[in-house]
Amino acid sequence: MSHRAHLAVALDGAGWHPAAWRESTARPTELASAGYWRDLARLADDAGVLFATIEDALSLGGRSPEADAETRRDRARGRLDAVLLSSFLAPATRRLGLVPTVTTTHPEPFHVATGLQTLDHVSRGRAGVRLVAGSTPQERANFGRRAEGPAGLPASGRVEDDPALLAAFREAGEVADVIRRLADSWEDDAIVRDLETGKFLHRERVHRVDFAGEFFSITGASIVPRSPQGQPLVTALAHQSVPYRFAAAHADLVFVTPSDAGGVGGIRDELADAAAQVRDEVEPLRVFADLLVLVAPSRAEAAETWARLEERAPLTTDARVVVGTADDVVDEIRALVDAGADGVRLRPARLPADLVAIAEQVVPRARAAGILSPDGGEPTLRERLGLPRPSSRFARQEVGA
């Protein structure tokens, strides 16, 4: 093994399998409760998982490719806002990074940026975001501001063949840029709090962001002081050339979906090529491979459970699926790490059952096998990933009051 890697989890409702809510171990009546999410987050936190991503979408059907996703009644529906939920979970956890999903098309970028800065403050430096480009027709109908936009992948399956998708990624790039600019708009020492002189703020160290892009403009500083990480960790899921270029240009960490460990090297090469063309940041992009997992005491029991789920509602996913024991999952993690992944994000098929198995069986086995990076006690998510804290781009640049 050439290096050790980090482990993350991806949390979504009752689990990533659409029939998971019907399992006897599920808690379908609690999916919109604070206690349910607190239990999941604490389970991952106590296990030493690096961070948890929290899925989100802006319509009932989410991002399901099913034509009747909005209307069918055999799926778990309804969700909590991921950024708000993460801010609730921050004081309920100690070390776990919190990475909510944000759709870049409809929410106001200023609101997104300040929400993430707030999350970084209340978590004391454990905030991130997973940016999702584009929107579905149902999401656009919910907002009523845009009639046109992507309608899914084109027949070719390539993002570059759909002008609407290309525009969505350009817009997502602007959102990522503004998130970073607004995070930088306060210098670290902008707040004085001098009781004797009555001076609270160095006004010259709070900077106006003047951004005029293709899709929106921003004029002014953030309302939130600079947060512990300087900038929240920016992440994205990428699976082909245009998303790779987006991640290379705007993200700190990218999630990828290789069909097996052998695909990691090729993906890293393509990301490196994209980074050479568009990335200004010297620090290399961190690459996490996704695995969707169902864990049981035996392979036979795992296969039986999977068959039952698939009979109720077949799963459509771009991620590699591992159905087996904790040792089987550890073997897959080891193979991905050996192939060069900086980390692995596990998508539990069933919640809380598979997260319990990850916390109680997979993580201890992977740690004992020497696969996982040790927790050195670094206080922020960026530091635990070995990423530097960005300096404010406006530092010591004076502006008029």
Image (cartoon, rainbow, N blue to C red):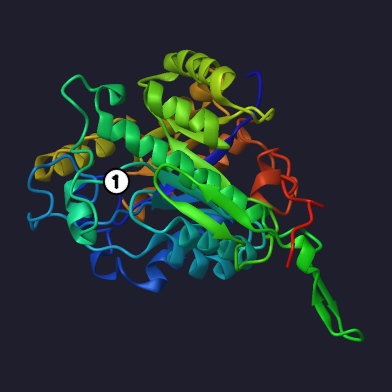
Q: Quadrant of residue 70?
A: bottom left
Quadrant of the image for the N terminus?
top right
Task: Please provide percent x and percent y for residue 164.
Answer: 26, 35
Quadrant of the image for the C terminus?
bottom right
Q: Residue at x 51, y 63 (%)?
A: 115
**Label 1 residue SS:** loop
Q: Return the residue nearer the eye: 188 or 36.
A: 188
Task: Please provide percent x and percent y for residue 282.
Answer: 69, 27
Mark 1, other Cα within 10 Å: few <14 / some 14–19 / many ≥20: many
Whether residue 323 is visible to the viewer of this picture, yes or no, is no
Amino acid at pointer 1: Trp
Can you say whether 321 is above or below 176 in the image? above
Can you say whether 401 is above or below 277 in the image? below
Say which residue label 1 marks.
16
Whether residue 210 is visible to the viewer of this picture, yes or no, is yes
Q: Residue at x 56, y 56 (%)?
A: 45
